[in-house]
Amino acid sequence: MTHCNFIKERSGGFTRLVFVRNYDLPMNQVMQHIGIAAVPDALREVSSSIAAECIASLLWKDMAYGHEFMSLEKARDYANSYIGQFDFEQVRFYTNGSWHEYHVKSGCAYTPLTEATFSAVILAVHPQFAAGLIIEDED
């Protein structure tokens, strides 16, 4: 399963993957290079497994109305494949909300980082590169 096929299958909102050279920049500069607002303390570090669960939740259903794009099992496969490419010792994962709980608890607290009604961000940050998965939905 090619992990980037999820962009085609998540047929609502906007899904972006952004890869940039990092050069061990401060987080606010990484955020700017990825194309999101550099809001202090907006991101919290999570484990790779929580990052994968966040991605699966966001691929499974939209944030506004809970419309299902794909099965949860398929979303988890995509998420694990995506996270698996970052099997580097120094990669750290960050997100702007508890997206892994979003559809379980009917929402979650998060910090908006784009101008969209709903904006979810999962960052993989290494001293030499950063990868941002940005998913936006409108109400």
Image (cartoon, rainbow, N blue to C red):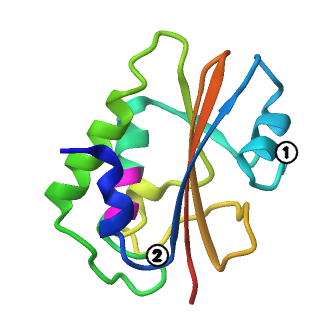
Residue 1, percent across and down?
18, 44
User: Any magenta on residue 70?
Assistant: no
Instruction: Please name the residue that numbered disc 1 is placed on.
Output: 40
Between 13 and 73, the one lying in front of the other is 13
Q: Residues within 10 Å of mark 1 (few under 14, many from 20)?
A: few
User: Any magenta on residue 58?
Assistant: yes
- Magenta-drawn segment: 55-59
Q: What residue is drawn where x is 84% and y is 38%?
A: 28
Q: What residue is drawn where x is 40% and y is 62%?
A: 58
> Seen in the image, is 109 located left or right of residue 103?
right
Number of numbered markers: 2
Q: Residues within 10 Å of mark 2 (few under 14, many from 20)?
A: many
> Seen in the image, is 138 located left or right of residue 106?
right
Amino acid type, residue under disc 1 in the picture: Pro
Q: Quadrant of the C terminus?
A: bottom right
Amino acid type, residue under disc 2 in the picture: Met
